[in-house]
Image: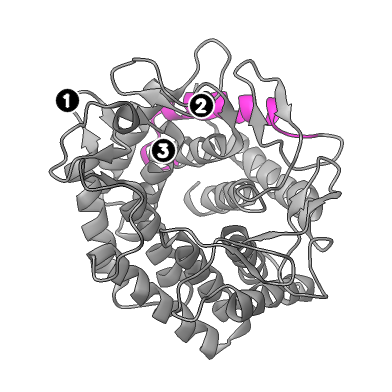
Amino acid sequence: MTYSQKELDQLADFYKNQLLQDTVPFWFPRSFDEEYGGYLLMRDRDGSILDSDKAVWIQGRACWLLATLYETVEKREEWLHGAKLGYQFLCDHCFDEEGKMYFHLDRQGQPIRMRRYFFSETFAVIAMAAYAKASGDQQAAQKARDIFGTCLQYAAGEIHGSPKFENTRPSKSIGVPMILINTAQQLRETIGDPRCDAAILNWIHEIETYFVKDDIRCVMEQVAEDGAIIDHLNERMLNPGHAIEGAWFILHESMYRGNDPKLVDLGCRMLDYMWKRGWDEQHGGIFYFRDVYDRPVQEYWQDMKFWWPQNEAIIATLLAFLLTKKEKYAEMHRKIHSYAYAHFHDAEHGEWYGYLHRDGRVSQPAKGNLFKGPFHLPRQEWYCWKAIEKLA
């Protein structure tokens, strides 16, 4: 069954209302740390504080959200004030002396952990670019472009992080080109940067060339340097939600390029392949990990349902439908939307649980930790609302 215009309008209203009346109010303004800057985001089911530490990824993501809401929804001074809290905390506390960003800080901004990769930097780019757009702060805009330049150096191998593995079995991950596509898209769509267009096409080409396996209908998470499948436990492991997120980044790029049919086709192929491998036909929802050859997966949480793969699948299936009008994508979207809001949403306290067992039982009720915060869910609700308004 397809979607009528009336149903799409109802969906847009639903996402808008969930975002503005349920999801965002769970987090803000109570998460603003007026004393030390940034946000207190490690929260229990009812919103009470579990831990005062601060994850740099989530500080950047929350800043991006608040600035984006201010710029695209309503000029609420509360949102701009909150975005500034995050922006200033990132600038004041989240970089070491060499300019590398931390991963985990205490409440006051003292460093606890540095990680090898540069994802903190990518979230700083989108945060600072969105804040610059909302506030008009040109220093923030320049910082965003400078940090993006550092990300480009990492991606090109001009800067090297500390290696996690020895070079016995060299591989590369889809995560780097994928996250950089979205980073560049956000930079381009807020303050602009002439490097973005060509870089995005290069990263899409890398994904299609090395990670999309049309012969076995899957999208790999890791491959050998020549794109070959590495037949070992870690490298055989698929992350359906991650690949589906990459699919909608590519579908989003197709819109920027006049609904480019090749990009629509690539994004839809990626979605099709990983929906087939990731959707749980028995209980519903997107599995966390699968094996490319359907063999046992090492990680014990492989059949759990995490919140964010459901968010990415909701966006991807809706966007695929809006771009192609194919009935199968409407059906897929109905399935994932219905499952996710029935199982993850907390009707009493708002927001979503983060972690469910395979059968839909809540594994633990916390709403915020080092990895979960105000990003995947509010981004999904904001993006779907705006996509329907734009495309329907």
Q: Amino acid at mark 1?
A: Asp
SS under mark 3:
helix
Tell me the chief SS of the magenta region.
helix
Q: Earlier in the sequence, mark 3 or mark 1?
A: 1
Residue for badge 2:
286
Residue sitting at the far top = 282
**Residue 169 falls left or right of residue 187:** left
Could you give the CA–CA distance between mark 2 and mark 3, rounded to whole angstroms? 10 Å
Q: Residue furthest left?
A: 226
Q: Residues within 10 Å of mark 1 (few under 14, many from 20)?
A: few
Task: Point out the stretch of residues depicted in magenta.
Answer: 322-346
Disc 3 to disc 1, how far (Cα)? 18 Å
In the image, what residue occupies the spot 16% across and 25% down?
215
Sequence-first disc among 2 and 1: 1
Residue 208 can be seen in this image: yes
List x then y, in percent, for residue 349: 85, 40
Residue at the disc numbered 3? 244
Q: Which residue is mark 1?
A: 215
- Residue 76 location (% of width, % of height): 76, 72
